[in-house]
Amino acid sequence: MAKIFCVANQKGGVGKTTTTVNLAAGLAQIGQRVLMVDLDPQGNATMGSGVDKRKLDLTVYDVLLESASVAEARVHSEKCGYDVLGANRELTGAEIELVSLERREKRLKQALAAADADYDFVLIDCPPSLSMLTLNGLCAAHGVVVPMQCEYFALEGVTDLVNTIKQVHANLNKDLEIIGLLRVMFDPRITLQQQVSEQLKGHFGDKVFTTVIPRNVRLAEAPSYGLPGVIFDPSSKGAQAFIAFAREMVERLQ
């Protein structure tokens, strides 16, 4: 049975897409079968996985509207070693079209259930806003991985997200829980970041992943080459950290 995780944070610019594609690549490198689902109309996770969103015949949009199955719409990224259920601008329309449909927040869940046996992990890259798309992701998932920077405002964002997860858990998805918080873009030289990191550990305890993703130029450069950092420069500190994170993820779930 595939473990389905949303990578979510209601604050923008915290590295959700970077986390999703690098974790997918890291898991694939240690022998896991992975599907990466892009639920953001910008399609950054699709492009960052070596897949051209403009050339896709079928996307997650078709899957949500039930005109295609996951098996029909997915493409394999040869460079990255995982499957991609891509997104492009079409997905913006799904927001409006889903509102009037039956089971509107459970459509992704049903679609993924049909492909369950094909994967060990399904990672869903959610848009920053709490939209019908994000809700589909949260309803389909067993848990949420929260990437966050150790900065003051980040703590407020996590509080909002925890409340959202509680509401979805209570009303729509009893399986949903926070799997863990991942500290990203971390610079140990900055005192504030160390302080916020300690506050996080004090408040969330073992929900904070041991692995820390450092601020790393190679991770930042990788998307412009259409690759995750793990593939673009495997020897970089950022790539090594994501491989370690993938291993920690697998260990945590065993």
Image (cartoon, helix red, strand yellow):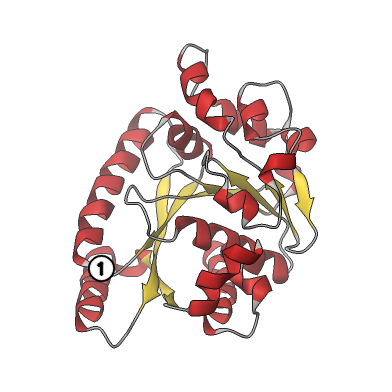
Residue 178: x percent and y percent? 39, 53
Left/right placement of residue 46 relative to residue 79 reads: left
Residue at 52% across, 66% down: 252
Residue at 53% across, 24% down: 93
Q: Is residue 101 above or below residue 249?
A: above
Residue 23: x percent and y percent? 58, 64
Answer with the quarter of the image where residue 186 lies. Answer: bottom left
Answer with the quarter of the image where residue 233 lies. Answer: bottom right
Is residue 75 in sight in this rendering?
A: yes
Which secondary structure, mark 1? helix
Q: Nearer the viewer, residue 138 or 188?
A: 188
- Within 10 Å of disc 1 (Cα), the crowding (few <14, some 14-19, many 20+) is some
Residue at 72% across, 35% down: 70
Residue 167: x percent and y percent? 31, 35
Q: Is residue 245 above or below residue 167?
A: below
As shown in the figure, which amino acid type bears the numbered disc 1?
Leu
Is residue 227 in sight in this rendering?
A: no
Left/right placement of residue 158 relative to residue 79 reads: left
Q: Is residue 93 above or below residue 54?
A: above
Q: Which residue is mark 1?
A: 200
Residue at 73% across, 33% down: 58
